Image: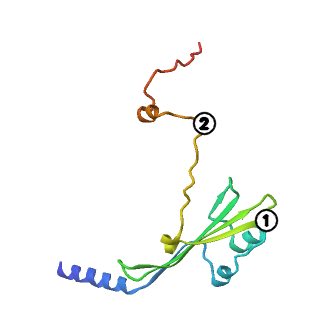
Amino acid sequence: MLKTFFYICIFFILANCSDKTTYSGKILNNEELNDINFKNKEKLISTLGNPSYIDPIENKFFYFSEKSQKKSIFKKEIKYSYVFVFKLNENEEIIETKVFNTKDIDTIKFSDDKTSNKIVKRGLLEKIFGGVGTQQELPTTP
């Protein structure tokens, strides 16, 4: 029993000595990080590949890239973490480029815009009680 415990302790000590580098999203080199000013969709996809997410409503392409290094069980360090956003127009030309450093999440400003609900206007009692009230009759077919 003592010998097994000793081997387990040695295993954990050796496992903590090794560094492990983990990539999430797109693996980008320094050349790709320095030159992100693309002109059109074709050049963007040929250089960075398919995006991590495509917003079909606003026609935006999102690329996520993160590199982290784990030195021990309890110590994980994020080297870099970026979100690249490219907005395209109808002609598939890039009209706006944004880069967010998600490692420094405190510096990112969140939008206060809210989607309005113009379909259903409800009063205070309807918001509180929800579906309480008279039931509508559903038509039945013979």
Q: Position of residue 125 (x, y in %)?
A: 43, 31
- The x, y position of residue 46, in whole percent, is 74, 72
Above or below, comparing residue 75 to residue 105 in the picture: below
Q: Which mark is residue 119?
A: 2
- For image coordinates 22% across by 79% down, the residue present is 5
Q: Which mark is residue 93?
A: 1
Image quadrant containing the N terminus: bottom left
Left or right of residue 112, residue 72 in this image: left
How many residues crowd around disc 2 within 10 Å: few (fewer than 14), some, or many (20 or more)? few
Q: Secondary structure at mark 1?
A: loop
Q: From the viewer's perspective, is 27 left or right of 15?
A: right
**Left or right for 48, reference 1:** right
Q: Are marks 1 and 2 in contact (CB under 8 Å)?
A: no
Q: Residue at x 55, y 35 (%)?
A: 121
Picture quadrant where residue 91 is located: bottom right
Q: Position of residue 15 (x, y in %)?
A: 36, 82
Instruction: Kindly identify the amino acid type of the residue bearing the numbered disc 2.
Output: Ile
Q: Position of residue 49 (x, y in %)?
A: 69, 70
Q: Around disc 1, counting alpha carbons within 10 Å, would you say few (fewer than 14), some (14 to 19), or many (20 or more)?
A: some
